[in-house]
Image (cartoon, rainbow, N blue to C red):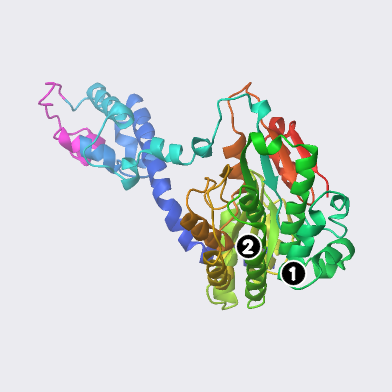
Amino acid sequence: MCNNKLQNMLFNIATTRSRLILKKYLQVQWKREICKTSMLYSEGNLQNIESETGKRIPRRILKRIEARGLTEDDVIQGSHQPVNKGTGILMGSSDNLKVLVDDMVKEGVTGTHNESEFPSDKIDYTEIKKTRDQTITAFRPKTNPLDTSLILFPGQGSQFVGMGKKLLAYNGVKDLFEMASDVLEYDLLDICLNGPKSQLDKTVVCQPAVFVTSMAAVEKLHELHPQVMKNCTGTAGFSVGEYSSLVFSGMLTFRDAVRVVKVRAEAMQRASEIIPSGMMTVFVGHNSKLNFAMLAAREYCSQKLHIREPVCCIANYLYSDCKVIAGNEEALQFIEDNKQDFNIKRTKRLPVSGAFHTQLMESACEPVVRALKNVEIKKPLFRVHSNVTTKRYHTDSEVVKLLRQQIIKPVKWEQILHTLYSRPQGEHFPNTYEVGPGKQMGTLLKIVNSKAHQSYTNIDV
């Protein structure tokens, strides 16, 4: 698509975004007008205010002018000389008008008003900032962090042919694969060790394979680092890896978790076959317009391709310069073709069959909820952090609710890492273990918090 056509199309579909930014623009604009007006008065250019600014006096200033017995024309023309009842100052001269404007500028910065110019003036942004601080919900035990540990579990995409080979020598590993194969009704270990890759990459196989391999790696962790279970303070898993966290913490049994993961994988596979969709990693910078790109992609699909309720949104928050977006195939193709117009640095398609963690997975939610309601959920031995909220689980009903939402909502992995690792400067970090195939969680930790990564260990599978 040529740039002219793209610009014309974006101009037509940007109405929604324009409405959203209009209020913010007006908030900034009136402050600029105050400064312009103050400067013109100080220079004595009372007759040229309207011609210099191209506008009348801003409404916020005008209200205070009227409160002093003046009109807009009086101030601009300097033709009226009322006396301020409070100060007895004659208001018609250049010097006195400068005092008036200086006073209003001061009020505009420090004063309080009974009526807000904009509704957002009433918002307490201090409270909003507090609610967005992930570290508020973090747990910091009153012990030396070097004597504690955190466990991270990978998700779909970390699989590879041959995973599990380095685990077979440890006690209990073969038993786990055999138990899982009984539930799944196929030889999971054989697929993990020998492939083929095309079979292993299928959602219906990949999710159970990553989950079981991660739990088998826990057996290796027990033998190599037996102290971990005693000093573990928290755990988190990426997407399907969250089920590994729940089993590791004692909230779910291994067999029950295999049943639920089997249902989840089959339901998400079916959902991905309904509408052509996918996922794509996008690398952005400070000037990238990713939100606008996703809006434009949705509008393009809706208006040009007549796709009903198209989806294009963030599915995974990886780190500040990298997100995974997901949605209709046509929407992803639009962004891929026009990434330069939105200042997106690079894109990379993911080898998955559907738009996971978006509304396109809605049909997969109910089967997973039914499966979760048929298993026993116990109290955790230590904190398990949710992909949806970044906070720890409290009750069994919360587990069912959030694991349902996890299917259709983004994985907030970057936020989870901030929750687990943000600390005052100079404070030590806990020992971190990535348990499962690959080293993706360690790579993300190094990008988000390089000092915390210095205490990172990978359990090779």
The picture places residue 365, in percent across and down from the top left corner, at 55, 68
In magenta segment, residue 49: no
Q: Is residue 72 magenta?
A: yes
Q: Residue furthest left?
A: 85
Q: Quadrant of residue 82?
A: top left
Q: Earlier in the sequence, mark 1 or mark 2?
A: 1
How many residues crowd mark 1 within 10 Å: few (<14), some (14–19), many (20+)?
few
User: Does residue 249 sit above or below 451 in this rendering?
Assistant: below
User: Quick check: can you spot residue 287?
Assistant: no
Badge 1 amino acid: Asp
x, y (%) of residue 252?
A: 60, 55
Q: Residue at x 84, y 51 (%)?
A: 167
Q: Which stretch did the figure color magenta?
A: 65-90
Q: Residue at x 38, y 32 (%)?
A: 35
Dot 1: element = helix
Q: In the rendered view, does 87 fall on the left or right side of 412?
A: left
The answer to which quarter of the image holds residue 93 is top left
Q: Main secondary structure of the magenta part?
A: loop
Q: Is residue 287 left or right of residue 100?
A: right
Give the alpha-carbon distance from disc 1 to disc 2, as whole Å. 12 Å
Q: Secondary structure at mark 2?
A: helix
- In the picture, the disc for residue 256 is 2
Kind of residue indicated by mark 2: Asp
Above or below, 227 relative to 103: below
